Image: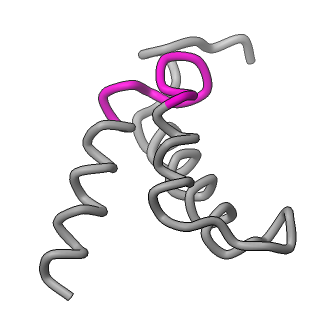
């Protein structure tokens, strides 16, 4: 559809980020799962091109907060 940046619905940007992270840590595509930090580093590297940069940083904080709780 040719959408870019903020034109892409927020929910779509969130789902793309979460789906990519899940695929990386579960090994869904590659067969071998990545460690959480490796997956987050890949997401951060793609922030601004593949992933919404604000969501990428917020997602890192969300993952870090979950590690402190459980």
The answer to which of 49 and 13 lies nearer the viewer is: 49
65 in the magenta segment: no
Up-down: is 16 above or below 30?
A: above
Residue drawn at 48 percent across, 64 percent down:
36
Quarter location, residue 70: bottom left
Residue drawn at 60 percent across, 58 percent down:
19
Residue drawn at 61 percent across, 69 percent down:
25
In screen coordinates, is 47 left or right of 2?
A: left
In screen coordinates, is 46 left or right of 26?
A: left
The answer to which of 35 and 46 lies nearer the viewer is: 35
The answer to which of 33 and 29 lies nearer the viewer is: 33
Up-down: is 37 above or below 6?
A: below
**Colour scheme of the picture:** one colour
- Residue 16: give x, y in percent of width and height: 58, 46
Residue drawn at 44 percent across, 27 percent down:
52
- Residue 57: give x, y in percent of width and height: 30, 37
48 in the magenta segment: yes
- Residue 63: give x, y in percent of width and height: 30, 63
Judged by its main secondary structure, the magenta piece is: loop
Number of marks in picture: 0
**Which residues lie in the magenta part?**
45-55
Quarter location, residue 34: bottom right
Up-down: is 66 above or below 43?
A: below
Can you say which quadrant of the picture contains the N terminus?
A: top right
């Amino acid at each position: 559809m040719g959408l870019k940046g903020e034109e892409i619905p927020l929910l779509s940007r969130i789902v793309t980020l979460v789906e990519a992270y899940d695929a990386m840590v579960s090994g869904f595509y590659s067969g071998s799962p990545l460690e959480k930090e490796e997956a987050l580093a890949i997401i951060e590297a793609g922030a601004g091109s593949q992933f919404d940069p604000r969501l990428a940083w917020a997602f890192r904080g969300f993952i870090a907060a979950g590690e402190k709780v459980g």
